[in-house]
Image (tube, rainbow, N blue to C red):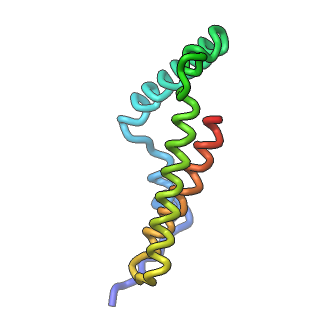
Amino acid sequence: MQQRRILSEKQINAELLNGNLATPKWYFPVMGVLGIGVVIGFITILYMFNRGLGVTGLARPVYWGLFITTFVFWVGISHAGIMISAILRLTQAEWRRPVTRAAELLTVFSLLTALFSL
């Protein structure tokens, strides 16, 4: 039997919060790159608002534009999540619980992403 360690409240807080309070060295460079990506995204959205939907491929001669294709893609991904979850539930596989949860989460988030692409 292992002996119990008696820890003070400060030691418990230090051990539990150490992963949340200390940032690794790669954190700020990665956040900088992601921030640059967000700024580029906003610039492209402003460009689209300024020039119109023709820059997205929704001009008159183009029938399948960027937004429609993205919407159909994410709805299809959500169908895959529903199918995986349904198959695992119908077969009553005991190992299915984490996979089913992940598939249902995939369904929810892909439907939300499809909603945002409208």
Q: Is residue 111 left or right of residue 95?
A: right
**Image position of 9 with respect to 29: above or below:** below
Residue drawn 52% across and 63% down? 82
**Image position of 79 with respect to 92: above or below:** above
Residue 46 horizontal/vertical position (percent): 63, 14
**Image position of 80 with respect to 30: above or below:** below
Residue drawn 47% across and 58% down? 80
The reply to whether residue 27 is in sight is yes
Q: Nearer the viewer, residue 24 or 84?
A: 84
Figure label count: 0
Q: Is residue 70 left or right of residue 23?
A: right
Residue 43 horizontal/vertical position (percent): 57, 15
Residue 76 horizontal/vertical position (percent): 50, 50
Q: Residue furthest bottom?
A: 1
The reply to whether residue 11 is in sight is no
Residue drawn 48% across and 21% down? 36
Q: Nearer the viewer, residue 96 or 58?
A: 58
Q: Residue furthest left?
A: 1
Q: Is residue 43 left or right of residue 5?
A: right
Residue 65 horizontal/vertical position (percent): 54, 26
Q: Nearer the viewer, residue 18 or 52?
A: 52
Residue drawn 48% across and 51% down? 77
The quadrant of the picture occupied by the N terminus is bottom left
The quadrant of the picture occupied by the C terminus is top right
**Image position of 5 with respect to 15: above or below:** below
Which of the 4 image quadrants contains residue 107?
Answer: bottom right
